Amino acid sequence: MSKITDEDRIDFLQELTNKEHYTGKVILRESTTGRGWRLHETSHPQGSSSVREAIDNTMKNMKRL
């Protein structure tokens, strides 16, 4: 198997999102219990249909981008 790139990883997550098992919207956020971060499908209004956009939004909100 060839080396898996970060782009491959994000594309894989986007493919899962596109299947719309729940909502087809994702969000990246800190857990409500404070035990880490979560990238997951959500019904939250700030959810995005793009995995990349969800990550970008969190980076912007954390002043990382």
Image: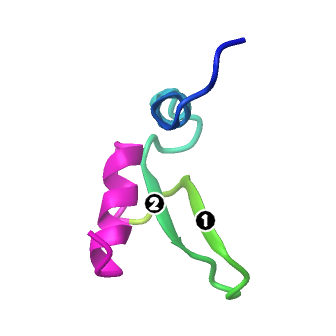
User: How far is disc 2 from disc 1 in space, using C-alphas?
Assistant: 8 Å
- Rendering quarter of residue 50: top left
The span picked out in magenta is 45-65
- Residue 63 position within the rendered picture, expressed as x and y whole percent measured from the top left: 29, 81
- Residue 49 position within the rendered picture, expressed as x and y whole percent measured from the top left: 35, 43
Circle 2 sits on which residue?
A: 27
Observer-nearest of 23 and 8 = 8
Asked if residue 19 is positioned above or below residue 43 in the image, the reply reads above
- Rendering quarter of residue 34: bottom right
- Rendering quarter of residue 30: bottom right
Q: Which residue reaches farthest top?
A: 1
- Identified by mark 2, the residue type is Ile
**Residue 55 located left or right of residue 53:** right
Of callouts 2 and 1, which one flags the residue occurring earlier in the amino acid sequence?
2
Circle 1 sits on which residue?
A: 38
The residue at 72%/11% (across/down) is: 1
Asked if residue 62 is positioned above or below residue 25 in the image, the reply reads below
- Residue 7 position within the rendered picture, expressed as x and y whole percent measured from the top left: 45, 33
Q: Which mark is residue 3?
A: none
